[in-house]
Image (spheres, rainbow, N blue to C red):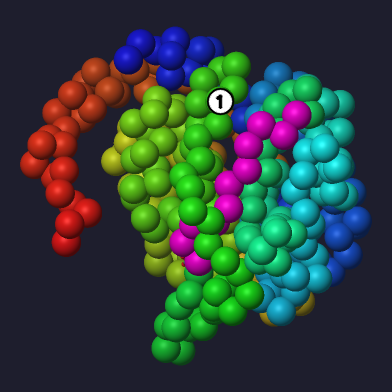
Amino acid sequence: MSVSKILSQKIKVALVQLSGSNPDKMANLQRAATFIERAMKDQPDTKLVVLPECFNSPYSTSQFRKYSEVINPSEPSTSVKFLSDLANKFKVIIVGGTIPELDPKTNKIYNTSIIFNEDGQLIGKHRKVHLFDVDIPNGISFHESETLSPGEKSTTIDTKYGKFGVGICYDMRFPELAMLSARKGSFAMIYPSAFNTVTGPLHWHLLARSRAVDNQMYVMLCSPARNLQSSYHAYGHSIVVDPRGKIVAEAGEGEEIIYAELDPEVIEAFRQAVPLTKQRRFDVYSDVNAH
Ligand SMILES: O=C(O)CCC(=O)C(=O)O
């Protein structure tokens, strides 16, 4: 595949590591707006902004329904309207972290990322496919499936620069989603995320770098900042990894914006040097599903 099809030009991205788990939705949205405005002032050529998982609600199974919104482009809900206006105002693509979504037909709740183009149009959404249900002794127990339902689809978004895939946090543990998007020609995988202080130190960097190296694409993880006042202590460390597995930007634990430039030449050069896409043997692993 030619470079122009993967990523048409160099693009600057900004990951906004906002304070997490505050109960006031409007205040959280305003804070997102303040940070996006700051990013666009600091780096006016930014083309894509990413927000964290559950950036405007507490990350808590008991709260998801209360904070949920119906996502219907013809009747935009609070967060949809707010992010759409921001994207249009700053002429920037926004991967709007995640919000709890209510499906009015089924009454089910999803953990959903909403994505807007630079005209403020909702160009896609991703419902978290793999729910975070874990019991780590002396570590963390969390069961999203107490109140959430899993999405049923992988998500690849088309933009004027090329395509990127979207997953949410625990989704990154399942390499198949990233691989599917890579096979569709994506230049990056973007995961609004909220790892914690138990699994973050163990796996955050490893998973980001693995998905990048597996697929020779950029990987971006955008986390909430750590808030020790909340019941859930997010890991922070929002990160951008290049197609060679090199960390090109990383946040600390507090509120912060990080920037990176994505370069089509880096994708192309590394794919030429290590031509995994040509060497894959789908004839050998085509029955991976059968076991
Ligand atoms: O996979 C992990 O360790 C953390 C996942 C998580 O926090 C989430 O899916 O929200």
Task: Find numbered disc 1 in the image and state the secondary structure of the residue it sits on.
Answer: strand
Q: Which of 82 and 109 is in front in this view?
A: 109
The quarter of the picture where residue 128 lies is bottom right
Look at the image and tell me whether residue 50 can be seen.
no
Which residue corresponds to mark 1? 158
In the rendered view, does 222 fall on the left or right side of 58? left
Q: Is residue 278 above or below residue 99?
A: above
> In what quadrant of the picture does the N terminus appear?
top left
Q: In this view, does 72 lie to the left or right of 4?
A: right
Residue 135 location, quadrant: bottom left
Residue found at x 60% / y 16%: 160
Q: In which quarter of the image is the C terminus?
A: bottom left
* Between 76 and 111, the one nearer to me in the picture: 76
Q: Residue placed at 85% from the left, 48% from the top? A: 77
Residue 123, magenta (yes or no): yes
Q: Position of residue 154 (x, y in %)?
A: 46, 45
In this view, the residue farthest toward the left is 284
The answer to whether residue 179 is visible is yes
Residue 47 point in image, percent of width and height: 67, 24
Q: On the rendered structure, is 283 left or right of 233? A: left
Rendered position, 213 above or below 57: above
Task: Examine the rendered structure and indicate whether residue 15 appears above or below residue 59.
Answer: above
Residue 252 spot, x, y in % from top left: 61, 54
Q: Position of residue 80 (x, y in %)?
A: 80, 44
Which range is magenta? 121-131
* Image quadrant where residue 66 sits: bottom right
